[in-house]
Image: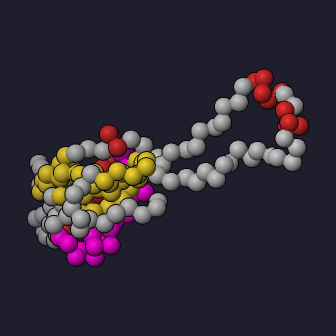
Amino acid sequence: MRYRVLLVLRGIPTHAWSVDTAQRVLGSSCAGIELDRDTEAKIDLKRFVLAAWCLNPDLIPSRRTLWVPDPKEPHAPGNLSLKEHEMIRSKLSGLRYEITVEVAELQHWFVRPEREVSPDARDSDDDNDFPGFHDSGDHGWEPCPRQTRFSTDASLPRLGPG
């Protein structure tokens, strides 16, 4: 995965704030979800902030419906009551939440391209032109992401170095 994203999810009820809920909302578009410290501690209840990895940020849904089923009512079998496995339910009730997903920040981690060497250059013995010089091909290259910030909200956290 080459993109690290900072996402803000709005509309998730606070009792459902978890990595599992975030994964249900984002589906297979993201992996490696990490909740922001303020989100995990439920300090700022207006937004659910997380960082995740994705293959393509265009696959992240901007809106999603989250359905949370109501907890099952306790079943106390009596003399005239059906057993739990014998009951036929006509519906499954629950609550529906409309979730919006905002990409606040994006890091594009790219892989250094292989140096293109022509077939003629591979076979040549031009190393003798510069005795004592060995070209490692590294040239001090360090991987660092291209970072783009979309949100103007200064109170949002920033993605670290990965």
Tell me how the rendering is colored. Answer: secondary structure
**Label total for image:** 0
Q: Is residue 2 visible?
A: yes
Which quadrant holds residue 17?
Answer: bottom left
Task: State the residue at coordinates (70%, 44%).
Answer: 137
Compared with residue 32, is residue 56 higher up or lower down, i.e. above or below? above
**35 left or right, relative to 87:** right
Which quadrant holds residue 48?
Answer: bottom left
- Name the spot of residue 80 as percent of width and height, x first: 10, 65
Task: State the residue at coordinates (79%, 29%).
Answer: 122
Q: Is residue 18 visible?
A: no
Compared with residue 137, is residue 4 higher up or lower down, i.e. above or below? below
Q: Is residue 142 magenta?
A: no
**66 left or right, relative to 121:** left
- Name the spot of residue 124 as percent of width and height, x first: 84, 28
Pick the residue in front: 32 or 80: 32
Compared with residue 63, is residue 80 higher up or lower down, i.e. above or below? below
**128 left or right, relative to 95:** right
Pick the residue in front: 80 or 90: 90
Q: Residue furthest front?
A: 130
Task: State the residue at coordinates (24%, 55%).
Answer: 151
Range of residues picked out in magenta? 29-45
Q: Residue furthest top?
A: 120
Task: State the residue at coordinates (27%, 51%).
Answer: 150
- Name the spot of residue 23 as percent of width and height, x first: 33, 54
**58 left or right, relative to 81:** right
Pick the residue in front: 160 or 20: 160
- Name the spot of residue 6 as percent of width and height, x first: 33, 57
Compared with residue 136, is residue 81 higher up or lower down, i.e. above or below? below
